[in-house]
Amino acid sequence: MDATSYEHDPVLIGPILSGLDPRPGDIVVDATVGLGGHAAALIPRILPGGRYIGLDLDERMLAAARARLAGFGDAVHLEKSNYADFAAVLDRLGVGLVRLILADVGVNSAQLDDPARGFLFDQEAPLDMRFDTSQKLTATDLVNSLSERELADVIYEYGQDTLSRRIAKRICQVRHDARITTTGALARAVESVHAAMGDAPGKRHPATRVFQALRIAVNRELENLEKLVALAPERLSDGGRIAVVSFHSLEDGIVKRAFRSPREGGVLREVTKRPIVADDVERRANPRSRSAKLRIAERIARSS
């Protein structure tokens, strides 16, 4: 799939613009630039004099973002990097403090809809799930190398699937006969567990949580998010803000705890006491926004 031609609606763009309040001259770190949807809305507001530093692990996303944002010239710097390493990128660019940090940590729709990436369970595709395709570890590696107990722990911890142990046992039975290398083979293994229990088909595919768990494990998503929110306060200027859009409770929990840190002597102040969610209009226009939660925090002024 050619990401440069993919139509993508950035989620919660209105609340992000109002919550971050970008101004001319601001330096912005977009930790997950994706296809550049949020960037295209934010950059005009930081000009003249502003700088937009966008990061992404996916070369295809970066290529699409470069094409979309080319008209902004030197105001934009895009780089392949994990958002957990954003501080190192700033150091390399000679940038100290920034006023705004944005991270939309959900999987990009262009990635989800590309069968070759292996994120979906309803298509026969390689069991991949890497954001960074130069990374060696894939979902195939995890599914075929982890012990039954390790698999169960991953599925339960990252997918919150209460059938994790039954599913792990079934996966190990299947891979004993042949390696599980496709999304379809894994989905069928999970489906067989539910079928054996007599579960009736529901709105959610039975493999949804398993695929989520493996994707998180392959890309170390929660570990990287922990690093991002831990490092962000030290790179925000006084009064600077960080906005994070998450898409499931594990991510949102990490962000919520980090943003409430002043209660434990931290350096952030919650701007959003409750997560902002999409309104009915956006939910109808962009189904992906239904699970999005936006939290914003502000850097408390440093003592003089």
Image (spheres, rainbow, N blue to C red):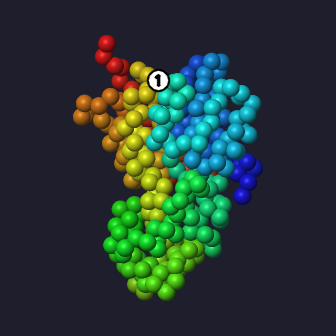
Q: Which residue is at the front of the view, 122 or 152?
A: 152
In this rendering, is residue 41 above or below 252? above
Tally of numbered tags? 1
Q: Which residue is at the front of the view, 207 or 129?
A: 129
At a point 43% along the width and 72% down the height, the residue shown is 145
In this rendering, is residue 108 above or below 47? below
75 relative position to 14: left or right: right
Residue 249 percent location from the top left of the image? 40, 53
Q: Which residue is at the front of the view, 278 or 28?
A: 28
User: Which residue is the extreme one toward the top?
Assistant: 304
In this rendering, is residue 251 above or below 67? below
- The quadrant holding residue 256 is top left
For label 1, count other residues whose C-alpha is less than 10 Å away and answer few (under 14), some (14-19) or many (20+): some
At a point 40% along the width and 84% down the height, the residue shown is 197
Residue 266 percent location from the top left of the image? 29, 31
Residue 217 percent location from the top left of the image? 44, 59
Q: Quadrant of the C terminus?
A: top left
- The quadrant holding residue 23 is top right
Please indicate, yes or no, whether residue 18 appears anywhere in the rendered image. no
At a point 37% along the width and 38% down the height, the residue shown is 230
User: Which residue is the extreme one toward the left?
Assistant: 264
Q: Label 1 is placed on what type of residue? A: Leu
At a point 73% along the width and 54% down the height, the residue shown is 2
At mark 1, the secondary structure is: loop
Q: Quadrant of the N terminus?
A: bottom right
Please indicate, yes or no, whether residue 181 appears anywhere in the rendered image. yes
Residue 62 percent location from the top left of the image? 65, 44
Question: Label 1, on which residue?
Answer: 97
